[in-house]
Image (spheres, rainbow, N blue to C red):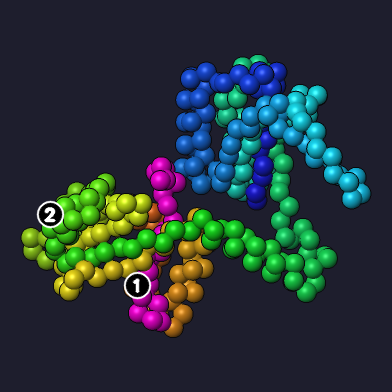
Amino acid sequence: MRVMVIVKATGSSEAGEIPDPELMADMGKFNDELIAAGIMKAGEGLKPSSAGVRVRFSGKNRTVTDGPFAETKELIAGYWLWEVRDLDEAIQWVKRCPNPMREDSDIEIRPLYEMEDFASMDDSGELAQQDLAQRVEVSMQSAQVQPYLFFGGRCEEALEFYKQALNAKVGMLLRHCDSPEPAPAGTLPEGFENKIMHAEFTVGKATLMASDGCGDSVDGGGFSLALTVPTEDDARRVFNALAAGGKSVMPLEKTFWSPCFGVVADRFGVGWMVMVPDPNQPQS
């Protein structure tokens, strides 16, 4: 069940008063709890209505009115989108929320319409198909594809080379011996423990990822494409689509760096690393 959790405006929010640092910290912790529970899908604060406009529809006419707007109690100052079991669960979470305002305030919970609500007027399923297609299109607009290079034991040498030749900047670098989840027995060749499990580096405006892999020999650097998608449903959909006529190399599963990660080779032999970003890690 999806709900919009609406923070109603107050005098202080309409005056544009910024919350004090203590409240910001408390709200940050609350949001962390929502994310860890897999409930929060989005959330933002809104500037006062004085920074906004309204567009009134009357037949074919459109009239634009600048804010601020009267009746503060009818305005909103922020919102979340949550996925919960039912309305009772949403209520329990709201009760745990710090008071978002300096003064007394209200938070409203409103369920979102789902396609099932329109089943009686969609006998053919055309509306449901259209809705799904639109959701997929919107979701995939935020997908990212990055080259992932494999160097079969020469990754550190390659990074140093790119730093000199291309002024590359190396960011994250994780060796196999530092991994929170050790490689299964027999996976790594002897002496590979200190090789690079994962690294990220930039060349100009491009960000690339690299690894020594697990000892596989490569000639001049092998590669896969790392495809990052917003949700686990997206990951399953694109993984299955890429695997059609291809091969699942590593089924989708939870890892220490992603709630859903898998490797697939498509029908043309191109390798894809499909993943969902860790919600607890800041995204670039």
Sooner in the amino-acid sequence: mark 1 or mark 2: 2
In 3D space, how far apart are the residues under numbered discs 1 and 2 (Cα atoms)?
25 Å
Element at label 2 = loop
User: In this image, 229 relative to 132: left or right?
Assistant: left
In the visual, does 130 lie left or right of 215?
A: right
As displayed, is residue 97 above or below residue 120?
Answer: above
243 w.r.t. 170: above or below: below
Q: Residue, x 68% and y 35% (percent of image)?
A: 6
Q: Nearer the viewer, residue 189 or 136?
A: 136
Q: Vertical placement of 202 versus 189: above or below?
A: above
Q: Quadrant of residue 40?
A: top right
- Count the labels in the image: 2
| Quarter of the image where one finds residue 77 | top right
* Crowd around label 2: few <14 · some 14–19 · many ≥20 (10 Å): few
Residue at the far left: name it. 191
Amino acid at dot 1: Gly
Tell me the magenta residue range: 260-284
Mark carried by residue 271: 1
The residue wearing badge 2 is: 194
From the image, give the main secondary structure of the stretch colored magenta. Answer: loop
